[in-house]
């Protein structure tokens, strides 16, 4: 519904601009707010294109046509796959280009490593059963900034993260600590990472033991053993970091916070989750569990 979308976007755009884009009147919108019926007229191609451009700008170029179709439908508009693909292609609207990024992990160390207990079983049946972790780097004009994450495989949510100017063991322990206090999981979470020295360090292994978690590590030189975390970093860099220049570490930190906490966890439509966001997927699962208990 056009009026509903205008209502949702009023914090981002002027009312008059939104009404012009969707070919409705301000008075019509206000009448709808007082209880009138929305205008269900099908959008013309120029109207649909203007809407696609607005969403593309709002989400900073994160979506290609498959996610764009679902975003349009979720906002109440009829949108066919072929039509959206055509409009985006003809007008040069596309998701950010993909790039490959080098790994940051130093696995050339003499520290003890754990076996690969996860064994590429990337579909746990409930939250807080399997967490995966990894690290990457970001360049700023002030120097490198390193990012460590903890991802719940069940709903692909980033449950813990840490940014620091040095790639030391405390970056991964801080990310784990955030995840632990956010989720408060029962004992026995399987924590999977690569064989990097930060994850193999005595400090991190002690933290896992303190939290009652089981350690699992990828096989040597095998990035596919931790594919979901690798994929998440690709999304971050393709959708947000690539093509941007951060003047300061503080600027980069603010942008990463916005990507993780405001966009990715709460809004980004994830293909693995049926094009729902991680938080919506978890909410739906929790509601289903409650419904099943009531029936039982």
Image (tube, rainbow, N blue to C red):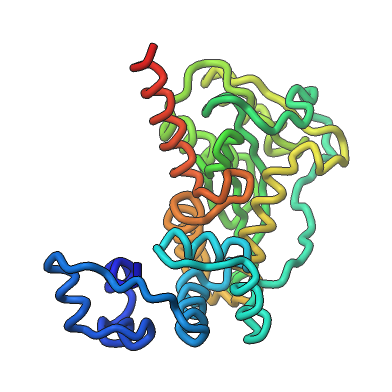
The answer to whether residue 198 of the structure is visible from this angle is yes
162 versus 21 height, above or below: above
Residue 216 place in picture, x, y as percent: 72, 26
Between 14 and 180, which is closer to the camera in this rendering? Answer: 14
Residue 241 place in picture, x, y as percent: 61, 68
Residue at image location 75% in from the left, 22% down from the top = 117
137 versus 224 height, above or below: below
The answer to whether residue 112 of the structure is visible from this angle is no
201 versus 247 height, above or below: above
Q: Quadrant of the C terminus?
A: top left
Residue 163 place in picture, x, y as percent: 54, 53
Q: Is residue 139 left or right of residue 210?
A: right
Residue at image location 52% in from the left, 84% down from the top = 45
Between 217 and 294, which is closer to the camera in this rendering? Answer: 294
Q: Is residue 283 left or right of residue 117?
A: left
Residue at image location 60% in from the left, 32% down from the top = 131
Residue lying furthest front: 41
Residue 103 place in picture, x, y as percent: 77, 53
Residue at image location 53% in from the left, 19% down from the top = 210
Q: Is residue 93 left or right of residue 76?
A: right
């Amino acid at each position: 519904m056009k009026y509903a979308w205008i209502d949702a976007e009023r914090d981002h755009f002027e009312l008059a601009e939104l009404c012009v884009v969707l070919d409705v009147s301000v008075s019509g919108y206000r009448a709808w707010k007082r209880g009138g019926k929305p205008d269900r007229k099908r959008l013309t191609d120029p109207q649909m294109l203007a809407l696609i451009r607005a969403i593309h700008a709002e989400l900073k170029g994160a979506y290609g046509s498959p996610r764009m179709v679902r975003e349009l439908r979720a906002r109440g508009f009829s949108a066919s796959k072929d039509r959206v693909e055509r409009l985006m292609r003809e007008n040069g609207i596309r998701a950010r280009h993909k790039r490959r990024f080098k790994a940051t992990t130093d696995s050339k160390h003499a520290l003890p490593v754990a076996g690969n207990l996860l064994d590429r079983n990337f579909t746990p049946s409930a939250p807080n059963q399997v967490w995966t972790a990894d690290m990457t780097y970001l360049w700023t004009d002030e120097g490198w900034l390193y990012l460590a994450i903890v991802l719940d495989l069940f709903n692909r949510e980033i449950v813990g993260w840490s940014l620091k100017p040095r790639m030391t063991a405390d970056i991964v322990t801080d990310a784990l600590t955030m995840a632990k206090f956010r989720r408060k999981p029962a004992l026995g979470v399987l924590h999977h990472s690569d064989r990097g020295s930060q994850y193999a360090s005595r400090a991190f292994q002690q933290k896992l033991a303190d939290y009652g978690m089981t350690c699992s590590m990828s096989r040597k030189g095998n990035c596919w053993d931790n594919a979901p975390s690798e994929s998440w970093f690709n999304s971050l860099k393709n959708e947000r970091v690539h093509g941007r220049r951060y003047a300061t570490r503080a600027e980069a930190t603010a942008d990463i916070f916005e990507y993780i906490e405001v966009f990715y966890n709460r809004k980004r439509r994830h293909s693995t989750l049926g094009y729902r966001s991680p938080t919506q997927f978890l909410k739906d699962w929790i509601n289903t569990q409650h419904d099943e208990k009531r029936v039982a």
